[in-house]
Amino acid sequence: MSKGKILVVDDAKVDLMNLERIVTGAGYQVVTAVSGEQAVDKAKSEKPDLIFMDVNMKEVDGFQATRTLQGTPETKGIPVVFVTAKNQQADRVWAQMLGAKGFVTKPYSAEQILDQLNAI
C-alpha cells in the first residue's frame, strides 16, 4: 500500500531517476515533472503530499514554480523541499521566504531524502 504521493521535479534525467528510486523504495507513489511549468500543472492535477523541487531549470525555475504554487489556492498547502546544487546562503533564505519545508543540496544521500519524507 502506498504511503502517499510525491511529485519529483528535476530537468536532469539522472537526478530525476535517482530521486524516483529513493522515494518509490520508501513506499510512496511518485509523479515526475521535468520543468517548473510542468510541476505546477502536475501539482494541480495530482495533488501530491510533498514536492521535491530542483531550482536550476530552464524557463520556469524551481523558485518561480514554488512562488506560483504558493499563490494558487489549490496548491498553496503542498509542502515543497528544494533539492538543488545551489548552496549559497541567499538561496536558502529565498527558499525559506517562499515557504519551503526543506532544503537538500546535491549531491545528497538517500538518508537526507528519507528524512524529508519522514518529516511530512
Image (tube, rainbow, N blue to C red):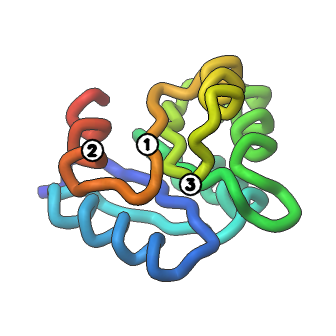
Amino acid identity at mark 1: Val
Q: Residues within 10 Å of mark 1 (few under 14, many from 20)?
A: many
How many callouts does the rendering have?
Answer: 3
Q: Quadrant of residue 12?
A: bottom right
Give the side of residue 105 with respect to residue 66, left or right: left
Secondary structure state at the residue bearing disc 3: loop
Q: Tell us which disc is closer to us: 2 or 3.
A: 3
Secondary structure state at the residue bearing disc 2: helix
Q: Quadrant of residue 38?
A: bottom right
Give me the residue at 56% from left, 54% from top: 85
- Above or below 97: residue 75: below
Of the numbered discs 2 and 3, the one sitting upstream in the chain is 3
Secondary structure state at the residue bearing disc 1: strand
| Distance in Å between CA atoms under marks 1 and 3 | 9 Å
Q: Position of residue 91 (x, y in %)?
A: 67, 33
Q: Position of residue 115 (x, y in %)?
A: 23, 37
| Distance in Å between CA atoms under marks 2 and 1 | 7 Å
Of residues 84 and 120, the one nearer the viewer is: 84
Give me the residue at 49% from left, 31% from top: 79
- Above or below 13: residue 111: above
Q: Quadrant of residue 18?
A: bottom left
Q: Which mark is residue 104?
A: 1
Q: Residues within 10 Å of mark 2 (few under 14, many from 20)?
A: few
What residue is shown with label 2? 112
Give me the residue at 16% from left, 65% from top: 25
| Distance in Å between CA atoms under marks 2 and 3 | 14 Å
Of the numbered discs 1 and 3, the one sitting upstream in the chain is 3
> Outermost residue toward the right?
59
Image quadrant where one finds the N terminus? bottom left
What residue is shown with label 3? 85
Give the side of residue 64 with respect to residue 4, left or right: right
Of residues 74 and 8, the one nearer the viewer is: 8
